[in-house]
Structures are given as structure tokens and as C-alpha cells.
Amino acid sequence: MVKNSGDFSQRHPFLFGFAVLAAVVVFMIGAMAAVRFLFLGGEGGMTGKRYGLVRIEGPIIDAEPVVEFITGLRDDSDVAGVLIRVDSPGGVVGPAQEIHAAVKETAAVKPVVVSMGSVAASGGYYVACPAHKIVANPGTLTGSIGVIMTMGKWKELMDRIGLTFEAITSGEMKDAGSPYRELTPKERLYFQNLVDDLHDQFVTDVADGRSMDIRKVRELADGRIYTGRQARESGLVDEMGGFEVAKDMLRAMTGKGNLPFDEGPVKDRGLLDMLIGVVSHIDPGKATGPRFEYTVR
């Protein structure tokens, strides 16, 4: 007679517990998706007359979620205006330019107000400048209009441990910026020209977004940080105030009163993804090549 070996939960308690946990996670994800679809209009947004609230927080590395959300608000006729809350030290040039373009395109068709938090500097200011109005706290850190290029330098370490590195390239500049050797004078000039061109793009876009004389912007754009009060005095910011002041300003501009705010983008990234993004931002040595940034240092 075969002995009863017990049920699965008794024979494999670890696997059983893991299966239960997985089932709970799947159920919660499905439930949240159902609520989002039934009550928030599918892609994390409300339906009906409303304002849009876009949060741009932390290093600007991946523009896609923010651009998609802003574009949706721009194209939705039920969205009377858009409030953008910026709390960012800036980030990589390309993503900052993509968000800047989305903000500019939205401001062409409906009111856009920016509220600056503790910091909205460099790329954080870049994404804000196309808005109709910018509101900052007196102690907000902003400005830092400039470009920085960073690259790792491992030559000294490799010399100490006796390692060498050789690259075979198709052109003289293909290996420029290699961390395994010093820059040549020609390469340094090459990278400086790239930085200068990116800086000129920044200055031009700020002058356009703020309707300022480009010579005035060039005077301000030496990379220095300004307080919110200093930024208002120089023309980079319109009003002093916090988040509620910016909300009231948007309501006044639209004349629509106390409509609800549709907030996004929805953050679906896991903890590991966020950690990888932050590490890659703060440690340029992790990158495979030179990195150009609109960021405060």
C-alpha cells in the first residue's frame, strides 16, 4: 500500500508560497489595470473637462513617457491647459530636447504653466522655457544654462597594472574620447566645438521660448545657478510662488475654474530600472563613450 505523501503545499512549502505570492501580484496588477481602464480612461488619464499635470522629476534620461503624456494632453480637446511641475537637475541633451519640443508644441495650442520645485536647472530649465508662464519659489535653484561633456579616464590605472588597449578605426576621430589614452589637442578642439554647438542650441531655444534678446541670454548662460528670485530679476522666471500659485495662474489663463487635474505620466518602472538609470547618470565611467549633458554639476 502506497503511503500518502501529503499535498503539494506540505511537500514543497517554498514553491507553494512563491506560487501564492506570484498569484497575488498578478491579481493586483490586473486589478489596477482594470481600475485604470474603467475609471481613469485607459492610459492613466481621466476623461471629461480637466487640466493636465505633468511631473518631470529627477534626472532627465528617458523622455518617452513624458513626451507621450504631454502629446496626449495636447491632442485632447477636453484638456483646457497644462501645468508642468519640474523638479530636476537636468540630464542628457537628446531627451531634454525631446521634452522641450513637446512642451513647445503644446504651448502653441493651449495654455502651459510651469511650476518649479526645489531645483529646475540646466535641462530642467530647458524643458520649462517654452511655457507661457514660469512660476518659481524664491529659493528654487534654476538657470545653469550650459553644456557639459564627461568621459572616463583609465589610462593612469592601466599603466599602473600593466594593461594596454589598442583600437583600429576607420577614421581619425572614431576613437576620440577613448578612456584608455589622453586626448590630443585636435580631439579636445573637436569636442569643444560639439559642446559649443549644443550650448548655442540651448541659448537659442531659451531666447525663443522666453522672447528675450539672445545677447542677454548669452550673458546669463555661463553655467551659473540662479535662485528663483534672481531668475525673475533676469527674466528667466515670471512669478514667485509655489505649486498652488501656478495652479491659480493656469485657471486664470484658461478661465475654466476649478477643473480636476489629470496627472502623469504613470510610473511603471521597477526599482531595478530606476537604480540602473540613476547609476548611469551619476557615473559617466559606466558609459561607453563621451556623454553630453544639460545638467547641473
Image (cartoon, helix red, strand yellow):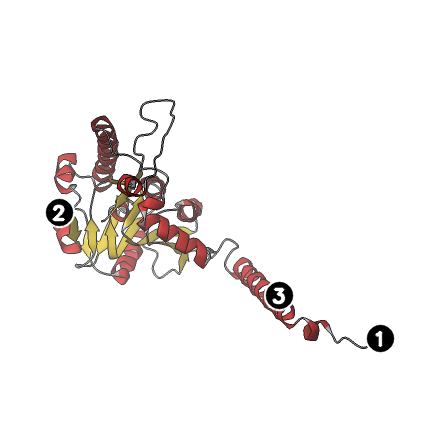
Q: Secondary structure at mark 2?
A: helix
Residue projecting furthest to the top:
171
Q: Position of residue 230 (x, y in %)?
A: 13, 52
Q: Earlier in the sequence, mark 1 or mark 3?
A: 1
Name the residue type under label 2: Ser
Q: Which residue is mark 1?
A: 2
Q: Nearer the viewer, mark 3 or mark 2?
A: 3
Name the residue type under label 3: Ala
219 or 210, which lies in front? 219
Label 2 to label 1: alpha-carbon separation: 88 Å
Q: Position of residue 36 (x, y in %)?
A: 52, 59
Q: Which residue is mark 3?
A: 23
Q: Secondary structure at mark 3?
A: helix
Name the residue type under label 1: Val
Asked if the residue at tag 3 contacts the one at tag 1, i.e. Cβ–Cβ closer than 8 Å, the answer is no
Q: Which residue is mark 2?
A: 234
Judged left or right of residue 290, residue 225 is: left
Q: Earlier in the sequence, mark 3 or mark 2?
A: 3
Q: Residue at x 32, y 34 (%)?
A: 178
Residue projecting furthest to the right:
1
Label 3 to label 2: alpha-carbon separation: 57 Å
244 or 65, which lies in front? 65
Characterize the local packing of mark 3: few (<14), some (14-19) or many (20 or more) Cα atoms within 10 angstroms. few
Characterize the local packing of mark 2: few (<14), some (14-19) or many (20 or more) Cα atoms within 10 angstroms. some
Rendered position, 269 above or below 162:
below
